[in-house]
Amino acid sequence: MSFTVFAQQMDFESYDPPSTLVVPENPKSHAKFPFIDVHSHHWRMAEMDLGKLIGEMDSLNMQVIVNLSGRGGEHLVGIMENVNKSVHKPRIINFTNIELRSIDEPDWTSETVKQIEFDYKTGARGLKIYKSQGMTNVDSKGERIRIDDPRIGPVFEKCGELGIPVLIHSADPKSFWEPMDSLNERWLELKTHSRRKRGPNDPAPWETIIEEQHNIFRAHPNTNFIAAHMGWYPNNLGKLGELLDEMPNMYVEIGAVIAELGRQPRAANRFFEKYQDRVLFGKDSYKPEEYPTYFRVLESDDEYFPYYKRYHAFWKMYGLALPDEILKKLYYKNAIKLIPGIDASMFPE
C-alpha cells in the first residue's frame, strides 16, 4: 500500500481555521452595569451632534464618556459651549491637552500652567498627555522632549492642586522595539502596520520611555496619574502590580489591551481582586461595535473566543466572569473617585 503526501505551503496570515470546539457562548451587547469610558477621542465635539453620540452610548449602557481630545484654550471653549447647551451635559466629560512645540520659550511653563487654570475654569476635568511626548515631540534643537522634562513638572503639580487627574499614554507595546522575526508576537501587526516598527533606540529604548513616565509619578505624589493601556504591562501583571504597590498615585485603564487580559483569565482575576480600586474602564478608539468584546471578556465565563482584530491578537480569549462589586469599581466607581464633575447619582450604589 502506498500513500501520496501532498506538500502545501501557506502564509502565516492566511492560516485562520474556524474552531471546532463546542462550548456555551454568551455574547454581550451591552454592559451589565452603566459604565464610564475614561479613554475616548472626539475631535469634532465642538460641532458634533451630541444626541447621536448619546444614542450610541445608551445602546451600550455607557452612562458617561470622557473625551480626552479637548485641546485647550479657545477650542475647549467651543466644545464646552456645545456641551453646556445640551440636555446631555452630565454625560460628557472633557480633558484638556498641552502644546509642547514651544517648550523652549522662556515663559512656556508659566503660560502652560495658566492654560491649565483657564481650561479648568472652562470645564476641563483632567489632562491627557499623548504618546507624542517622549516619542515624536522635539525641542528647537531637534532633541526628543522627555516625559520627565523638568519644565513640565509645574503643569503636573497644578493638576494635583486642582484635583484633576493626568491620563498619560507613553510608548507602545514593547514588541514594537524588538526584532521583527519569528519570535516576535506582534509580527503580523508589524507586517500590516509597518510604521509601528521601531529600532532599539527609535526614538529611545522602550525601557527609557516607560521609566520616564514612572519618574513623573514618583516626582508628583500629590497628582493622580492614569497610565493608558495598563502602562503597557498587561502581559506582565506581576510587574504592573509591583509598580502599583510602589506608587499609590498610579492608576491604569484597560483601553486596547482586553485581548491580553482575556488570554490569562486566572492571572487577570487575581490582579483585579488585589487591585480592584486602581483599574478603570477605557476603550480608546471609539467604535461602538467593538465594545461587546470587552463586556464578554469582563462579564462572561465563555471559553476560547476571538478578538475582533486578528493582527492585534491571533490567540483566543476567555471570560473573566468578574464579581459584581469588582465590575462596578471598574465600570464607574473608580472613575467617579478620580475624575471630578461626574454625577454619582446616575449610577447604582
Image (tube, rainbow, N blue to C red):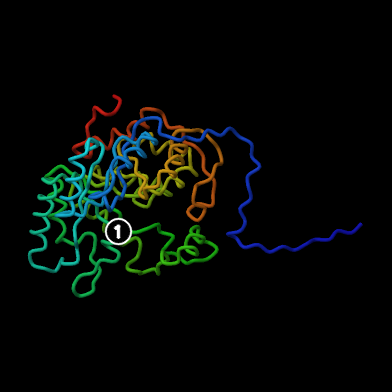
Front residue of 262/211: it is: 262
> Can residue 319 be seen at all in this image of the molecule?
yes
- For the residue marked with disc 1, what is the amino acid? Lys
**Position of 126 relative to 129 (above/below):** above
Front residue of 341/259: it is: 341
Q: Quadrant of the C terminus?
A: top left
Front residue of 325/65: it is: 65
Measured from the top left, where is residue 48 in percent x and y? 27, 48
Measured from the top left, where is residue 336 in percent x and y? 24, 35
Q: Which residue is mark 1?
A: 131
**Position of 102 relative to 321 (above/below):** below
Q: Residue furthest bottom?
A: 141
Quadrant in the rendering for residue 30: top left
> Can residue 330 be seen at all in this image of the molecule?
no
Q: For label 1, count other residues whose C-alpha is less than 10 Å away and answer few (under 14), some (14-19) or many (20+).
A: some
- Residue drawn at point x = 60 percent, y = 60 percent: 12
Quadrant in the rendering for residue 15: bottom right
Measured from the top left, where is residue 195 in percent x and y? 41, 67
